[in-house]
Amino acid sequence: MTHISVKVDGTTYEDEVEPRLLLIHYLRDRLGLTGTPIGCDTSNCGACTVELDGDSVKSCSVLAVQADGSQVTTVEGLAQDGEWTGLQRAFHEKHGLQCGYCTPGMIMAARDLLKENPNPTSDDVRQALEGNLCRCTGYQNIVRAVLAAAGRSGQEVSA
């Protein structure tokens, strides 16, 4: 067992973990933060995307011990006092979700994009989200949602 201290969504946790425990399993099974889904367990789908020290990572490809001393933000940590962020609202308003399974990862990856590029084009959004898979929406409304969150109308999204 290895001792870790990690700050998740503003709360510091001190735990003993197996060195091989994946961050996604630590978040879900140990901390009960189930908003981040387990997708493929191979880092192909991006459903488990979280922020680790401000950068988006696929939590199925990070060991919990690698997060020691770090700050993790999950989709559950975004809303403040029950109020969704503009990005979360945009996903809802622009129907950027269908079954919702990929949505937490899409939101976290889009958040990372908007921090780096607050005025992206639809091509920028598509490139930033290429590591996150959705089997339901065809991506059009996801791109519209990210552009809306960036203050764009979503009109430039090609068919």
Image: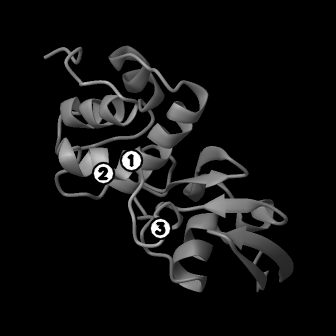
Q: Residue furthest left?
A: 159
Q: Is residue 69 visible?
A: yes
Element type at mark 2: helix
**Number of numbered tags placed on the structure image:** 3
Disc 1 marks which residue? 86
Q: Which residue is mark 2?
A: 89
Disc 1 element: helix
Q: Which residue in the protein does label 3 denote?
A: 76
How far from the left and from the top, in percent, is residue 108?
48, 48
The residue lying at 47 percent from left, 61 percent from top is 75
Report the amino acid beneath label 2. Arg
Residue 10: x and y in percent read 67, 70
Do the residues bearing badges 2 and 1 touch, measured as CB atoms within 8 Å? yes
Between residue 105 and residue 151, name the one nearer to us: 151
Mark 1 and mark 3 residues within 8 Å of each other at the beta carbon: no
Asked whether residue 20 appears in the rendered view, the answer is no
Q: Position of residue 134 (x, y in %)?
A: 27, 43
The three-letter amino acid code for the residue at tag 1 is Gly
Question: Can you give x and y, in whole percent of width and height, for residue 70 in the image?
Answer: 79, 61
When the figure is inspected, residue 37 is found, relative to residue 16, above or below; the finding is above
Estimate the spatial distance between the alpha carbons at disc 2 and disc 3, rounded to whole Å: 14 Å
Task: Report how far apart the C-alphas of labels 1 and 3 lie in the structure.
Answer: 14 Å
Q: Earlier in the sequence, mark 1 or mark 3?
A: 3
Is residue 2 shown left or right of residue 25?
A: right
Which amino acid type corresponds to the residue marked 3 in the rendered image? Glu
